[in-house]
Amino acid sequence: MCGIKTICEEFGLTPRAVRLYEERGLFQTSRDRFNCRRYDAGARAKLEQIAAYRQAGLSIDDILEIFALDATDPVAQRELVARKLRARIVEMDAARRQAETLLQRLADKVVTLNPEVVATRRAVAGRR
């Protein structure tokens, strides 16, 4: 059993996040005689999974859905995780494309607004 400070250091979480995950029902803790949370091996295992899923961009609701399948059907749980991660990759690819488009628009505006940049680019293009 360990305290919240150890958990936060071990999994790169904030105390606020750990408390939120407990409040949302992702895992349970026990309390010591001073009413401080104590994290046993089961809670630590859940927090390790939660930290990994959150780093991958999954929401708390996604994780609740995944954990709901965990005990009943591990194959279905793995398939659900894979589907959610593939969907996350699609979202991230779309965000990357949007950022690239914005960068190109900004670069085009810089070139139009700064005649020195235009002259330098023409000079470099002439050397090729």
Image: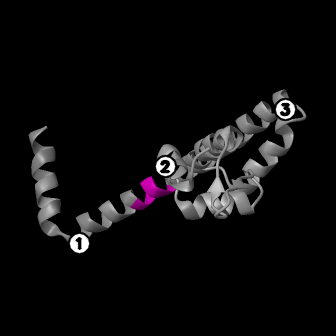
The residue at which mark 3 appears reads as 76
Which of disc 3 and disc 2 is earlier in sequence? 2
Report crowding for label 2: few under 14, some 14 to 19, many 20 or more residues within 10 A (C-alpha).
few
Q: Relative to 116, is 8 above or below?
A: above
Q: Residue at x 67, y 38 (%)?
A: 41
Q: Is residue 68 left or right of residue 42?
A: right
Badge nearest the viewer, 3 or 1? 3
Viewer-side residue, 13 vs 106? 13
Viewer-side residue, 22 vs 52? 22
How far apart are the alpha carbons under marks 3 and 1? 55 Å
Q: Position of residue 20 (x, y in %)?
A: 66, 63
Is residue 99 a member of the stretch shown in magenta?
yes
| Quadrant in which residue 4 is drawn | bottom right
Report crowding for label 3: few under 14, some 14 to 19, many 20 or more residues within 10 A (C-alpha).
few
Q: Residue at x 50, y 44 (%)?
A: 10
Q: Residue at x 49, y 49 (%)?
A: 12
Q: Secondary structure at mark 1?
A: helix
- Residue 52, labelled with which disc? none
Question: Which residues are drawn in magenta?
Answer: 98-102
Q: Are marks 3 and 1 in contact (CB under 8 Å)?
A: no
- Residue 12, labelled with which disc? 2
Q: How is the image coloured?
A: one colour
Viewer-side residue, 99 vs 70? 70
Q: Residue at x 74, y 50 (%)?
A: 27
| Quadrant in which residue 22 is drawn | bottom right
The residue at which mark 1 appears reads as 113
